[in-house]
Amino acid sequence: MKIFRWQGIIALLVLIALISIFFIFFFDSLLKKTLEKTLSSTLKRPVEIENVKTDVLSLKFNINGLQIADKKDRYKNLLEIKSINFNLSSQKLAFKKYDIENLTVEEIRFSTKREKPWSIKEREKEEKPSKEEKKIDLKSFKEKLSLPSAKEILKREKLKTVETGKYYEEKLKELKIKWENKYKELQKEKQSLEALQKQIKELEKKAKKIKSIDDLKTITENAKQIKKQINQKIEKIKQLKRELKQDTELIKKAYSDLQKAYKEDINRLKRKYSLSLEGGVNLAGLIFGDKIKGYLEKGLSAYKTISPYLKRGEEKQKEMQEKGYRLEGRYVKYKETNPYPDIVIQNGKLSLVAFNSNIEGSLLDFSDNQKIYGKPFKITFKSNKSKYFESFLFDGIFDRTKQISKDSFTFEIKDLISQDLEIKNFVRFTDNKINLNGNINILNEQNIQGVIKLVFEKTKPVAITGENTKRLVEKLFEGINRFYLAANISGIIDSPKISFKSDLDEMVAKRFRNLVKEKVQKVNRELNKELEKYKNQYENKLNRYKTEFEKYKSIVENYEGTYEKALKEIKNKLSKKALEKKLKKRILEKFRF
């Protein structure tokens, strides 16, 4: 009997040789293609791997040049990793458990340029990025600062000043005609006055020669008649004075109403043509909103990619418990005495390339079933001072150990020297030094709540608009070298709501209000000046009427004074008492001789 069966040994050696050849020459490339296909299908985006190297005996794996494409841009990668190195536990692998004790991931990069666009076969799946660029509508600023000139306003507006001036101008024209006629009548009165004065003088002459009682009676009677006429004339003059005073009051009222109308026009036009200081534009949100939304979108995309793997083992376990496969010719998985997740990464050493700096990180306790493993998954990136920042910290915790999952992320970057930030054709922020911090919490992998805050400790706004609006933009940002922006995040991760708050908006709004105030004050000064011209024009006409009326008043008072003087003269020289005295004196003088 033969101890060895050479045919069997040779067959075994050939089999071993074939397996060795397969693993040496084909396994790595086959694994590479399998990984690319599986990851592309899982991540729903093209994934490329430069090469895969394995050591089957020691269960060591090395994946180089991993590129995960950005679906929105064929010329960019969402994520790029230089190399991934890990080894599997052979003990756990025997039970179909993938336990990685140590993982090393080198040079993680986000949003990198590709040497060539991803495969043309995937082109149909490409999500076209929006070409619409966020712009500040300077037209709205200019419109808010645009006011017609004072002359244009006065041309289009119905002015109470003009209406009042015209009204009184017509009234006073009528009065002027009236008093011109009365003046002509007064001119006739002059002859009557002269005749009465002549009669008085004649009576005075007779009074000097009075000889008898009959002369006294005659002179007294004539004096009474003249006195009666003078009183009638005085009463007529007083009536004219009252009428003139009443008409003169109209001039005073015209002055008052004209001034009132002028003030009402000023106030009404100021209100109507004042510039709105309300509203404004969310500058901070427009300038930085897209970047923050972009980073958040990429972060949530990565979160949604990782999240299912953290509970895959748990879901699989539930599925196996809910369905029975006995007597169906299927694989049956019995309850484990020492349950262990299907996939575990105990420790990981990470390297992130961001802000032109190399940032070291760590990964701890990744598993696909945290309820069994009993530990949350933690990921940290931390770096001290570099050329581009003072310090960098990111802490992420994926906690699925309880019924309600709670994932939290905190980050802080101090004194980050960032690239220029700009809104096209508006403003560019240069020489930026930023403090960034934030925290985000996600419950049940759906509800998100958090805040991201950026404090620009140093910045320099530069206007990059056209020449016509450059000065406006320069004034809006003049003196601004520090501001903050807070982004509040809420809602669900598929469509989170982001609201922005920033003192930049208030600072710009304040400068805008000052510009508006200057513009309004300028137009108001012009309005005051132009309206005052109208007012002065009618006041000058009123002054002329006033002068005319004062002339009439002087004439009337002159006549009144002359008649009163004549009346006084009659009283003093032609009264009965005065005449009796003269007669007595004459008689005494006659008998003295």
Image: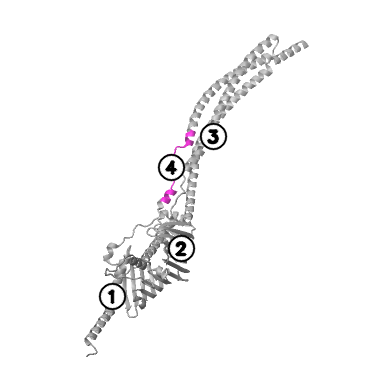
Q: Which residue is mark 4?
A: 152
The image position of residue 554, as x and y in percent, is: 59, 27
Q: Is residue 68 magenta?
A: no
Task: Tell me which numbered mark, 3 or 2, is placed earlier along the sequence.
Answer: 3
Label 3, label 1: how many angstroms apart (C-alpha)?
A: 101 Å
Counting residues from the start of the chain, the first of labels 4 and 1 encountered is: 1
Q: Is residue 39 visible?
A: yes
The residue singled out by tag 2 in the image is 438
Q: Please rate how many residues cluster around mark 1, counting C-alpha atoms within 10 Å: few if below 14, some from 14 to 19, many from 20.
A: some
Q: Residue 439, image x and y in percent?
A: 45, 63
Q: Earlier in the sequence, mark 3 or mark 1?
A: 1
Residue 593 is at least partly visible in this image:
no
Where is mark 1, residue-wise?
29
The answer to if 149 sits in the magenta stretch is: yes
Q: Which mark is residue 256?
A: 3
Secondary structure, mark 1, is helix
The CA span between labels 2 and 1 is: 43 Å
Lower sequence index among marks 4 and 3: 4
The magenta segment:
140-165
Residue 216 against residue 474 in the figure, above or below = above
Q: Amino acid at mark 1?
A: Ser
Q: CA distance from mark 2 to mark 4?
A: 54 Å
Q: Position of residue 127 (x, y in %)?
A: 31, 61
User: Which quarter of the rendering shows the N terminus?
Assistant: bottom left
Q: Amino acid at mark 4?
A: Glu
- Category of crowding for the residue at label 4, using alpha-carbon neighbours closer than 10 angstroms: few (below 14), some (14–19), many (at least 20): few
**Which of the 4 quarters of the picture holds residue 154?**
top left
Among the 4 quarters of the image, the one containing residue 462: bottom left
Q: Are marks 3 and 2 in contact (CB under 8 Å)?
A: no
Q: Amino acid at mark 3?
A: Ser
